[in-house]
Image (tube, rainbow, N blue to C red):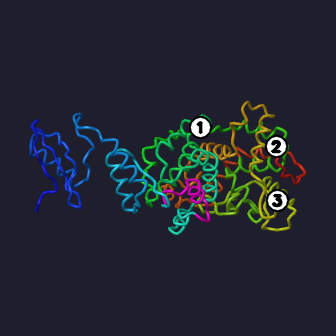
Amino acid sequence: MSKPYLLFKRPNGIYYCQIRLPDGSLTNNKSTGCSSKSEAEKVAMKWAVQGTMPVRVNGKEPEMKSTDFISILNCIRTFEFTDSNINEIISVLKQREYIKSAVISKTVEARPIDEYLLQFWDSERSPYIKEKRLKGQEIHAHYIANNLSYIYKYWIPRLEGKSVGEITRDDVNAIFDDAKVMKYAPKTINQIVCALTLPMKYAFYHKMTENNCYDGIIKCSNRYKKRIVLSLEETQALFDAEWENDSAKLANAVAFYTGMRQGEIAGLRLRDIGDDRIYIRHSWSKYEGLKSTKTEEEREMIIPPLLRDMLLTQAEMNPHGEGDNGFVFFGLLPSQPTDPKNWLKFMRRALKLSGYENPDEVTFHAFRHEWCTNTLSEVGDKRVCMIGSGHKTDSVFAIYSAHVEKEEVLKKIAVATEKMFLPMVESLEKVEYEIRDEDE
């Protein structure tokens, strides 16, 4: 069997090569740059097998003639290429490192990036979300909505006019040069980045792009800003101050006294107020409505008669006539409670009136931190406190907490919370509740 190349030595001592083409013809002479025949044969065989014969090997070899180049261009303009031809050309250009990637028209890679991203974060049309749900993995509506908002606000304006296959790591990293974006907390910046890199990772693994633009992205350090927690004295001053909205004041008092999450308080219905306790059965989300709690487990909290009566009074003011199913902190529509964001707004206003210097640094969730910190300090048993707060951070704790008698735990928490928090609840003014749900 003949070799796929011919070798001959020129007077200068260098071996030259010609490669046999599929039609039997030979290429032009090409210097191997080798004076050793064995080395020249290695080079020639590599060129023949890989089809990577270079235009020139050293400075002595002449450049391509302009007439040859024009012929190539004319061929490209007029030849009817097949998909296979196009892929071969792209492959050679990538092997020679003239290009990193290329997008062929009318392929999945050529799909407009904005069209792809909007479908990816569409709850009804996304193949990714459908796949997650089919495999029993939960994906929250608010998570989808947040990512969709990031796509609209940050990525579509940046990537407009590009296709899926054109997006590179440079496009992702460019977001870190945006001064407005870099003002956000590290966690938010990383979420903005992930809104793009997650769809692109999915595209890469499903062969919609050749570009891996998600690996190697150095994200912001997730060092969380320490949450500001009010002292008991500052909290007393807060509830002693004049509030613009009495319903909001009560919601904040419930958070302070019980450590409940905002969504759990919003999800309270009349049926959840017992003789001496609150039954925490649901949580409210503006995207998903009434749903299970964060841990998908119900819990109870013993409360004093005063707080129970205030909650019942608030619930009785519900005008929608739903009975036990009516929301305690009702909204303008029977199907939803008031918007919990108003609780924070009115709390910060009262906090400012109390003399607190920076009310905007305090969040509604800070009451939960305050409850956990003070209750743990008073009770001294983390297992007991976590049953009250509903935290389930690891399987080891769950095993230990299973051996604690629930009623005894609730009584311990009741004693501690009454000692620390009841004086402030008792200081809440008796008021006539008004139906107020405006966004002032």
Residue lying at 59% horizontally and 60% vertically, measured from the top left: 119
Image position of 406 (left or right of 27): right
Q: Secondary structure at mark 1?
A: loop
| Magenta stretch prevailing secondary structure | helix
- Quick one: quadrant of the C terminus? top right
CA separation in Å, label 2 and label 3: 18 Å
Between discs 2 and 3, the one toward the N terminus: 3
CA separation in Å, label 2 and label 1: 30 Å
Residue, far right:
432
Image position of 145 (left or right of 94): right
State the mark number for residue 226.
Answer: 1
Amino acid marked by disc 1: Lys
State the mark number for residue 427.
Answer: 2
Q: Is residue 282 magenta?
A: no
Between discs 2 and 1, the one toward the N terminus: 1
Front tag of 2 and 1:
1
Between discs 3 and 1, the one toward the N terminus: 1
Front tag of 2 and 3:
3
Counting labels gives 3
Q: Is residue 119 magenta?
A: yes
Amino acid marked by disc 2: Ser
Which portion, as a residue range, is magenta?
Answer: 108-125
Question: Horizontal and vertical percent for residue 5?
Answer: 16, 53
Amino acid marked by disc 3: Leu
Disc 3: which residue: 312
CA separation in Å, label 3 and label 1: 36 Å
From the viewer's side, name the closer residue of 278 and 332. Answer: 332
